[in-house]
Amino acid sequence: MIILKNGTVVDPASELNDKRDLVIDEEGYLKILMPGETGEYERSNAAEIIDCDGMIIGPGLTDIHVHFRDPGFTYKEDICTGAKAAARGGVTNVILMANTKPAVDSAETVEYVVQKGSETDINVYTCGTITKGLKGKELTDFDELLEAGAVGLTDDGIPILDEEVARLAMQEAAKRNVLLSFHEEDPAYIENNGVNRGKASAYYGIGGSDRKAEISMVERDIRLAIETGARINIQHISTAEAVELVRQGKKVAPDRIFAEATPHHIALTEDAVIEYGTNARMNPPLRTEEDRKAIISGIKDGTIDCIATDHAPHSDEEKAKNIVDAPSGIIGLETSLPISYDILVRKNGFSILQLFCIMSQKPAEMYGINAGKLAIDRKADLVVFDPNREYDWTKHYSKSFNTPFKNAKITGDIVMTFAKGKLIYRA
């Protein structure tokens, strides 16, 4: 039995935000105690009492945009190491993207990922692909993928350029009420991806990615979603114009248009690409300060539904290549909570309830996952976060270390993570 004492307990589902004591019993079940109830548990010789004064205890995070690179690219990450990195970051539920090798476009590959995920300490879910082989031409068998265990569908990493294919996918998804997530970058507006066309591309003397690459596809897909009745998620939004398109789309279809933002897009601008090189190269790229502020405003007013890391591990050798040849993407699972807390709560006035809503409750609801809340008499699924503790970079579990935040001084760190009723990470 573990007693967590004196922490601020936060649960957006019940709007709880108060000092409470929690008990995780011998079987892993959670109890939120009322004042005065703790004594009977403290008298048990089996109890470990942990003082959480000054700490925040909230539901384990749900990250709906994660790459564990398994199968096919396990030198970057695998399901086991990715799960350990997630636990270190307080992330207890992840939804994996389908751009592996082979792609998750068959029941066999879905079942492989689900089975390996079930062997980890966290809850691992996966999407299947929208099109066969991620080629954007022929739809996969949606029913086969969903029956095998996929919780959504996406060709993340590659945009679906053919409008008729996108329309057909939305029509089929609408029949099944399954969420489709879209990577919104039209290559017609891109010369060298991963770097914003502007100050950063000028610095490197390359063409870069024009903001129209995102804007044009977000505009198309919101139009198609309204037309077909589909539920869609705009992934890793990066431009102010795209935020506004989502805002207007939600006025027409509030329960069917969703969007996510990454910690790096709320924390950094294209200046980071100049400073950190390939470790700040990602698709879509970091853009301007005006875009960064627009994304934060979109999160605050509910236009953007959740924070998702797009955790994208790459090896040191790959990231050591030049700015054009290095792969895009950075890791993010282990630092998402402290970075989001710093940017949104400390610097932009979000409440801690709002933070856990967009990092725990809402992302779980988008995919229909039974998570994101502190449910009593269920197995403990929670994170203990100390907003004043300096982040400890010596505790790093991902196979890769491609991040512009590497070894930066970050205030805020995860103290403990519980999932499936077990303590799975402790600082």
Image (cartoon, grey):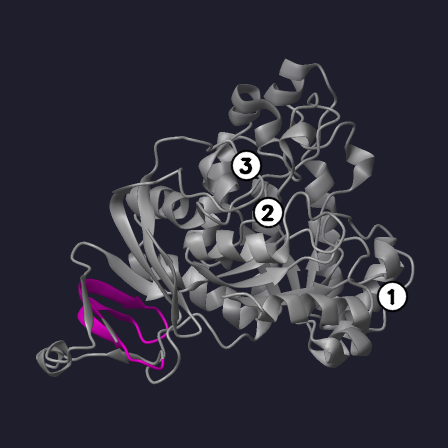
**Which residue is labeled 1 in the image?**
139
User: What residue occupies the far right of the structure in this picture?
Assistant: 137
Q: Specify which label sits upstream in the sequence, 1 or 2.
A: 1
Select label 3 or label 1 by which is in front: 3
**Which residue is labeled 2 in the image?**
237
The answer to whether residue 303 shows anywhere in this view is: no
Select label 1 or label 2 by which is in front: 1
Relative to residue 118, is residue 274 depicted above or below? above
Q: Do callouts 2 and 3 mark residues in contact (Cβ within 8 Å)?
A: no
Residue 232 falls in which quadrant of the image? bottom right
Q: Determine the secondary structure under disc 1.
A: loop
Query: How far is the residue under mark 3 from the one under mark 1?
Result: 35 Å
**Which residue is labeled 3 in the image?**
401
At label 3, the amino acid type is Phe
Q: Determine the secondary structure under disc 3.
A: loop
Left or right of 375, for residue 22: left
Q: Is residue 19 magenta?
A: yes
Which residue lies at the image location 51% right of the left edge and 45% below the top edge? 332
Q: Specify which label sits upstream in the sequence, 2 or 3.
A: 2
**Residue 16 got which mark?**
none
What predominant SS class does the magenta segment belong to?
A: strand
Relative to residue 326, is residue 51 depicted above or below? below
Q: Is residue 319 magenta?
A: no
Task: From the top left corner, tell me how far across and down residue 222 is, in percent.
Answer: 69, 59
The answer to whether residue 107 shows anywhere in this view is: yes
The magenta segment: 3-27
Residue 30 falls in which quadrant of the image? bottom left
Q: Determine the secondary structure under disc 2.
A: loop
Task: From the top left corner, tell me how far across and down residue 379 is, in percent.
Answer: 39, 79
At label 2, the amino acid type is Ile
Which residue lies at the image location 65% right of the left edge and 39% below the top edge? 284
At label 1, the amino acid type is Leu
